Amino acid sequence: MKALSVVDVETFNLQQVKKPSPDIGEVVIKVVFCGICGSDIPRYFNGGVHSFPQVLGHEFSGIVEEVSEYVTKVKVGDRVVIAPLISCGSCQFCQKGEPAMCMNYGFIGSRQSGAMAEYVVVPEKNCVRVPDELSLREAALVEPLTVAIHGVNRVNVKPGIQVLVLGAGTIGLLTLLVLRAKDVGEITVVDLNQNKLDIAKEIGADVVLNPKNQSLANYFSSHKSPDIVYETAGNSVTQVQAVEFVKKRGKIVYIGTCTQDVIFPPKVFEKILRGEIDITGSWMSYSSPFPGYEWETGLRYMATKEIDVNPLITGEFKLEDREIPFIKMVEKNSHHVKLLYKINEESD
């Protein structure tokens, strides 16, 4: 079978490797679509993998190709998505039903072979069936959608509240879609990329702000401060701005991964105390029973068209295109949100 492996910094090899066989409790998935996650970018460009070679890919949909002994949850031919976390099941957090906090986890596409390949082996318990009315193309976005669902629900979201989303990447836009599905009030989205702000406006943002063109401080000094801020960019600037702009006794959810030191000016940090601001983090997308309500909810949102992810899919590629979609994702002012590898046909 074909597998796309990162073998060095900025180096992909499209290799012919042996088709995997499942151990007890595992299944083989014929991968149909695999998305490129923002976390895959440094794995390719910066060599940010646990070891070389590494087949990337943890956002994927496919068809059950083969099952092993004792597999009862899925059968050959089932259309599925895969929760990529492989929790140990034995640490104190797994025992408490908190798989996202697992202390000894594996992860498809980073700690073991991923889905940028024709076939991949996964545990049966990680498979979630895709509703008949949902395409596998759309279903490939359920993993990042579950991240947004988990993040949104870290605080109590009520209809009509005002929300600020910092960052209009994949997670920011999916957070916007989840918030709109939950019938919140005015949603403001902030990003430096006007192309992505245009998409945000198209899919339901009430206000879009580009700091290149408008002072955020001036804007929020003359408009009502948001009740909740979701920080999805993982940028040290926006991580401070979340505190700066939220209202007194407001709530902040940090979803974006931190990549630099975050330095709070004293006057901004003091807002946490004086405003009695609630701050929490959000990590991945899992709950109990594994993989959690986020997965069934995400698939239902898409199947019922309460959430339409199609505007976020901005390109499809083949494994033979290797690094081309990775390069397109990091181009200056790129309009791309979610790029997919189409690896197999859904039906032969």
Image (cartoon, grey):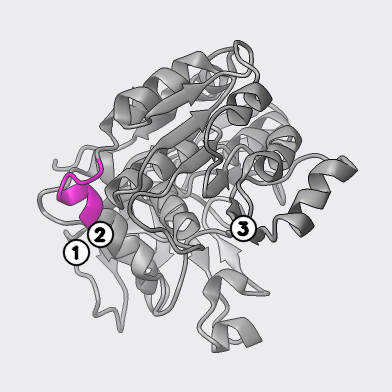
Q: Which disc number belongs to residue 341?
A: none
Amino acid carrying label 1: it is: Val
User: Mark 3 packing: few (<14 Cα in 10 Å), some, or many (20+)?
Assistant: some
Q: Nearer the viewer, mark 2 or mark 3?
A: 3
Give the residue pinned by disc 2.
Answer: 64
Of the image marks 2 and 3, the number of the one nearer the N terminus:
2
x 52%, y 37%: residue: 224
CB-based contact (under 8 Å), mark 1 and mark 2:
yes
Question: In the rendering, at what x and y percent does residue 29 appear?
Answer: 32, 56
Q: Is residue 202 above or below residue 105?
A: above
User: Mark 1 packing: few (<14 Cα in 10 Å), some, or many (20+)?
Assistant: few
Distance (Cα) linking label 3 and label 1 = 52 Å
Looking at the picture, tell me which residue is in the foreground, 66 or 256: 256
Amino acid carrying label 3: it is: Arg
Q: Is residue 109 above or below residue 212?
A: below
Give the residue pinned by disc 3.
Answer: 249
Looking at the picture, tell me which residue is in the foreground, 305 or 295: 305
User: Mark 2 packing: few (<14 Cα in 10 Å), some, or many (20+)?
Assistant: many
- The magenta stretch is 300-307
x 60%, y 53%: residue: 252
